[in-house]
């Protein structure tokens, strides 16, 4: 996570705190419905969340501000916080933060079986990062058929509400182009089988990955934009056929590993 700068003064914005203070307040803001994200911020060329620190208390109070950069702080004595690339605050890109998906309960729209081996959903949160489909502990894999579900999905139950900032997805070895056109959503609702052939829109979108582009065995970093999303369930779903894949008429979701980072 970075801010528009370390402690400094700005005539339009006031004092800018360090990133740790920004991140702490951002997390509190996510739990407070009146707080809002400003998706278009011109100054400092950063996506922003506007928060204010009440100076007469040691605690942070996150209040809705007028849209930045044209608005003004509610008080000249308060702080306006700018937050960009928020997921870096939990080291999601390097994987050194807490992975809230590890060993949690999972589900997927269907399960592939080969030679008696079940490629179950939990294999995407076992911490192995194995990318070889023919070697244990294998990975999560939905049915491989032209007659299976149109929009295969995978979901993890984090067991608590988490302010999700970053997600890492490990692609499989070979057939890596199957990881395409997928929607990542976070929220209070679990995805169910009724969405096997219909895109799930019940939770807030964290990220949409258009087409392919994730190399085989690559570790893709997903950042919730423009703001972190708070919720208990994280789902990944392919939402359309691939136009530049080996199998343009068949959707198969294969996840070697999924890691979720954020703050409780």
Image (tube, rainbow, N blue to C red):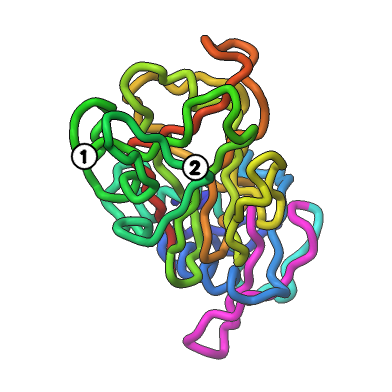
Q: Is residue 230 above or below residue 179?
A: below
The tag on residue 110 is 2
Q: Residues within 10 Å of mark 1 (few under 14, many from 20)?
A: some
Q: Residue at x 36, y 45 (%)?
A: 120
The tag on residue 7 is none
What is the secondary structure assignment of the residue under circle 1?
A: loop
Q: Find residue 22 and report its horizontal and vertical position in percent.
A: 50, 63
Q: Residue at x 39, y 47 (%)?
A: 121
Q: Does residue 212 show up?
A: yes
Q: Find residue 53 and report its horizontal and vertical position in percent.
A: 58, 76
Identify which residue, 86 or 74, lies in the foreground: 86
Q: Is residue 186 above or below residue 35?
A: above
Q: Is residue 189 above or below residue 211?
A: below
Residue closest to the far left: 136
Q: Residue at x 29, y 46 (%)?
A: 95
Q: Residues within 10 Å of mark 2 (few under 14, many from 20)?
A: many
Q: Quadrant of residue 257?
A: top left
Q: Main secondary structure of the magenta part?
A: loop
Q: Earlier in the sequence, mark 2 or mark 1?
A: 2
Q: Does residue 17 show up?
A: no
The answer to whether residue 55 is magenta is: yes
Over which residues does the magenta segment extend?
A: 48-69
The answer to whether residue 118 is magenta is: no
Q: Residue at x 55, y 42 (%)?
A: 153
Q: Find residue 136 and report its horizontal and vertical position in percent.
A: 18, 36
Residue topped by disc 1? 137
């Amino acid at each position: 996570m970075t801010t528009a700068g370390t402690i400094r003064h700005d005539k339009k914005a006031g004092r800018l705190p360090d990133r740790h203070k920004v991140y702490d307040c951002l997390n509190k803001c996510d739990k407070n419905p009146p707080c809002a994200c400003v998706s278009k911020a011109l100054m400092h060329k950063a996506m922003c969340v506007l928060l204010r620190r009440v100076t007469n208390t040691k605690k942070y109070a996150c209040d809705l501000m007028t849209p930045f950069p044209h608005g003004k702080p509610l008080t000249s004595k308060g702080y306006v916080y700018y937050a960009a690339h928020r997921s870096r605050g939990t080291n999601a890109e390097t994987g050194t933060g807490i992975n809230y998906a590890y060993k949690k309960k999972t589900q997927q729209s269907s399960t592939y079986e080969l030679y008696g081996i079940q490629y179950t959903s939990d294999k995407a949160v076992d911490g192995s990062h194995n990318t070889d489909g023919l070697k244990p502990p294998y990975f999560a894999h939905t049915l491989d058929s032209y007659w299976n579900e149109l929009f295969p999905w995978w979901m993890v139950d984090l067991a608590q509400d988490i302010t999700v900032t970053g997600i890492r997805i490990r692609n499989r070895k070979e057939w890596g182009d199957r990881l395409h056109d997928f929607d990542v959503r976070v929220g209070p609702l679990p995805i169910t089988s009724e969405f096997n052939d219909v895109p799930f829109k019940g939770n807030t979108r964290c990220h949409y990955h258009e087409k392919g582009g994730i190399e085989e065995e690559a570790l893709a970093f997903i950042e919730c934009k423009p703001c972190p999303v708070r919720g208990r369930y994280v789902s990944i779903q392919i939402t359309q056929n691939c136009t530049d894949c080996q199998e343009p008429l068949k959707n198969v979701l294969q996840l070697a590993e999924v890691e979720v980072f954020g703050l409780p």
